[in-house]
Image (tube, helix red, strand yellow):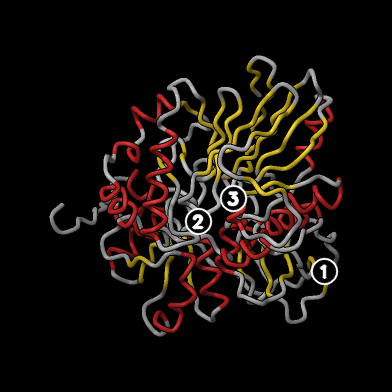
Amino acid sequence: MVRSGGMFLRQFVDDDLGCASYLIGDEDAGDAVLVDPVLAIEPFLEEAAAKCLHITRILETHTHADHVSGHGRLALEHGLPVAVHGDASVSYPNEPLADGDEIAVGSVTVRTIHTPGHRPEHCCFLADDALLTGDSLFVGTAARPDLAVDARDGAEGLFHSLQRLLELPDDVRVMPGHVAGSLCGIGMSAERASTIGQERRFNPALALATVEEFVADSAAVATPRPPNMEHIVDVNRGPFVGAPPALEPVARDRHFVLDVRDPDAHAAGHVPGAVNVPVSGSSFGTRAGFLIPPGSTVALHAESPAQAAAAATKLNAVGFLELAGYLEDVTTTDTLEPVEIDELEQLVAEGAVELIDVREPSERDAGYIPGSRNIPYRVIGEFADDLAGGKPLVTICETGSRAAIAASVLAASGLKARPVLNGGVYEWERRGNQTVEFRRCGS
């Protein structure tokens, strides 16, 4: 929470998505605006009520591609108007914004700065000394430019937008729309705020002096696109979306079963064909989104109705708005047999298994177990036929969470796979075992 003069500013971070929302207000006047709200709007309303602030409108920096916006709930449930740049081409009622538009919030003026690149309609909002950068300038990096337009066109637009932001004074605070953990940028700092001066000095993306250098640097970064991206954009651009329905008990029937329990519980016993993505792990919604088959109805296997509800909230946030329900009285007939590091050492030495490193290529290249094969967890199901009929399979990641996910995907495809649940590559190295780096030609 930050106060500057008469301005009230509160940052809200959804840790599962790595996205940030902002409440900006004038406590003396009792007015506020809400920028980039996520679907779970309750924390915003609670904070506004606690500070006696009346939210007057919603400001969107752009049409989000990684999470469902809460602007629909706020419009439907509270009658709030939504403002977004005219290039967004949305179908919901809105107040179109243009570069230079100013919005009065009591004594605070919020100025619109059109900053295309990440998306054509993208805008930043400058309120006193605070710059809400949305998906343009992050702490330590810049946004990716390939989520709405041709990557080169997006990179060119983003370069010029960043140069415009660099015209602001060094003491202007940078309040980003995403923090570390989001798919909307690579190399973000763990810090959740910065200043123009700090970014000018330390942000590698701002050190690229020409548009050609910036475009080449952007093209060199290979990053998975947010799962469900097109669907989420369509939802956020379309008619207002209200609150998802409450979760109810359901029989398994033909539903896709998503087991949201911890990996040890899933390994000890699970529903045949279930895929395990622990709701207690990081980036639950994003990870699940990569694995849920398009068009399927999802039934959750959870430890309790409360855990199922928590998982449903995170799935709703990434576009799964109509879940089948949660399973009751489940018969768990299938198991997985985890591999401990000491056993893995022996199996690798004997050449007795095919070891699948399920991290992203950039992580794997920094240090991997010799002889391992790299298949990221999010696409491993596509390799099931290729992996069938060979050596026994073992999945491994940094610490164990993605290895568990990958093993469950392979098991659901009819293959036997054993995950390294405790320690992963980190523990392998800690014990003095060898890892190697992947070096590209010329490096």
Query: Of all residues shown, which one is farthest toward the top?
Result: 5
Q: How far apart are marks 2 and 1 (CA)?
A: 27 Å
Where residue 415 sits in the image (x, y, percent)? 50, 79
Mark closest to the chain's N terminus, 3 or 2: 3
Where residue 339 sits in the image (x, y, percent)? 46, 61
Residue indicated by mark 2: 421
Mark closest to the chain's N terminus, 3 or 1: 3
Q: Distance between the residues labelled 3 and 1?
A: 44 Å
Q: Residues within 10 Å of mark 1 (few under 14, many from 20)?
A: few
Residue under the point 28% across and 68% down: 350
Where residue 182 sits in the image (x, y, percent)? 52, 48
- Asked if the residue at tag 1 contacts the one at tag 2, i.e. Cβ–Cβ closer than 8 Å, the answer is no
Taking 127 as reference, is 187 left or right? left
Residue 16 shows which numbered tag? none
Q: Is mark 3 on a helix, strand or loop?
A: loop
Amino acid under label 2?
Leu
Where residue 179 sits in the image (x, y, percent)? 52, 40
Residue 62 shows which numbered tag? 3
Q: Residues within 10 Å of mark 2 (few under 14, many from 20)?
A: many
Residue under the point 63% across and 17% down: 4
Q: How crowded is mark 3: few (under 14 residues within 10 Å), some or many (20 or more)?
A: many
Amino acid under label 3?
His
In the depicted structure, whether residue 99 falls above or below residue 2: below
Query: Of all residues shown, which one is farthest toward the left?
Result: 442
Residue indicated by mark 1: 329
Residue under the point 54% across and 75% down: 411
Q: Distance between the residues labelled 3 and 2?
A: 39 Å
